[in-house]
Image (spheres, rainbow, N blue to C red):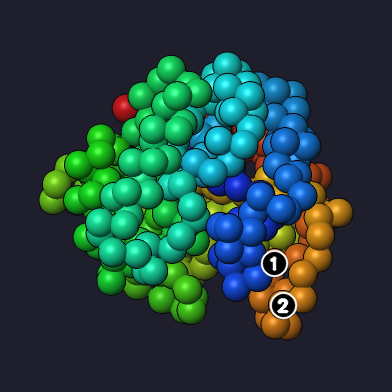
């Protein structure tokens, strides 16, 4: 079974865990490391002849347009991650519409292709922000991949959301982040911090179980997760553990993942 591979293209200082220390106005003064970390990803994708979906942050696209053009030239899908990495839970519908339009305009100036996919920063399409579905549709977005079908996480999640791909009333397609139910509990296995936290055999088992149930999995990582030498910031203990654990193992584990599973773009899996 072919699964969907996605990269949330942002730098180390863009992440929600650090937004109390690095606001948008501060980003220009930070060490821009996204080019070198993304190069590691592209090298591995080239090695295994895999194409992926890159959810590009508009602010990053403005700073390194040549990187976005290179990604597109290699045949990867370009989708959008918004412009400012502001959580939808912290925006009004009008503010989100402006942020999305800006991101699309910036990215479309670089790549000559239709952008039809969106992922919200920190998976912040929740029950409280379902209004975003209509904003996305109005801006030409055909699919979203922002819903995490779990109820335990303090920052995101839509408990009891469908585990498989589904469609909203307005026709927007949702590709939820992959979870597997074991003994009635939903276990995330979509990538990111879960990929770094679990021993690799656990990830392999869960993704194989998902495929065995007839579902295409979706997997995600960030370039900063391939950068163990990034600046370290003081965080509360739990967030620090979650954010920095096993960064030095990401690259090796990702290569093993590419050996063990078949991947393509989200657009390819959905047949769009």
> Does any portion of residue 256 appear in the rendered image?
no
Mark linked to residue 234:
none
Residue 111 position in % (x across, y down): 48, 21
Along the horizontal axis of the image, is 73 left or right of 202? left
> Is residue 188 at least partly visible in the picture?
yes
Q: Which residue is mark 1?
A: 243
Spatial CA span between label 1 and label 2 = 9 Å
The residue tagged with tag 1: helix, strand or loop? helix
Q: Which residue is mark 2?
A: 235
The residue shown at (78%, 37%) is 36
How crowded is the residue under tag 1: few (<14 C-alpha within 10 Å), some, or many (20+)?
many
> Is 186 left, or right, of 117 in this rendering?
right
Q: In x, y percent, where is residue 132?
A: 27, 56
Residue furthest toward the left?
Answer: 169
Measured from the top left, where is residue 146 in percent x and y? 40, 54
Residue 88 vs residue 64, the one in the foreground: 64
Q: Secondary structure at mark 2?
A: loop
Q: Is residue 141 left or right of residue 213?
A: left
Which quadrant of the structure image shows residue 137?
top left
Q: How many marks?
A: 2
- Taking depth in this image into account, of 148 and 39 the one nearest to the observer is 39
Q: Nearer the viewer, mark 1 or mark 2?
A: 2
- Identify the residue shown where x is 37% and y is 49%: 99
Rendered view: 45 above or below 96: above
* Sequence-first tag of 1 and 2: 2
- Residue in view at x 13 percent, y 51 percent: 169
Neighbours of disc 2 within 10 Å: few (<14), some (14-19), many (20+): few
Residue 83 image point, x, y percent: 46, 47
Q: Is residue 234 above or below residue 214?
A: below
Question: Are the residues flagged by discs 1 and 2 in contact, CB closer than 8 Å?
Answer: yes
Nearer the observer, 46 or 181? 46
């Amino acid at each position: 079974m072919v699964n969907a591979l996605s990269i949330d293209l942002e730098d180390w200082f863009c992440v929600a865990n650090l937004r109390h220390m690095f606001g948008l106005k501060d980003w220009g003064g930070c060490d821009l490391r996204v080019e070198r970390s993304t190069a590691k990803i592209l090298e591995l994708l080239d090695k295994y002849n895999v194409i992926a979906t890159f959810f590009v942050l508009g602010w990053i696209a403005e700073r390194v347009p040549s990187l976005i053009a290179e990604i597109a030239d290699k045949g990867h899908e370009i989708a959008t991650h918004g412009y400012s990495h502001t959580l939808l839970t912290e925006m009004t519908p009008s503010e989100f519409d402006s942020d999305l339009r800006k991101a699309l305009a910036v990215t479309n100036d670089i790549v000559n292709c239709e952008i039809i996919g969106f992922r919200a920063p920190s998976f912040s399409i929740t029950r409280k922000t379902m209004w975003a579905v209509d904003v996305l549709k109005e801006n030409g977005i055909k699919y979203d991949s922002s819903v995490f079908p779990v109820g335990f996480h303090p920052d995101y999640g839509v408990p009891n959301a469908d585990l498989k791909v589904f469609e909203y009333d307005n026709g927007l397609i949702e590709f939820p982040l992959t979870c597997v139910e074991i003994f009635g509990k939903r276990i995330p296995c979509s990538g990111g911090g879960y990929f770094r936290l679990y021993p690799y055999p656990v990830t392999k088992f869960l993704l194989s179980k998902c495929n065995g149930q007839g579902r295409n999995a979706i997997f995600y990582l960030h370039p900063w997760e391939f950068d163990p030498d990034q600046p370290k910031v003081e965080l509360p203990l739990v967030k620090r553990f979650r954010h920095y654990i096993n960064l030095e193992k990401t690259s090796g584990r990702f290569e093993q993942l590419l050996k063990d599973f078949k991947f393509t773009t989200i657009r390819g899996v959905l047949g769009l």
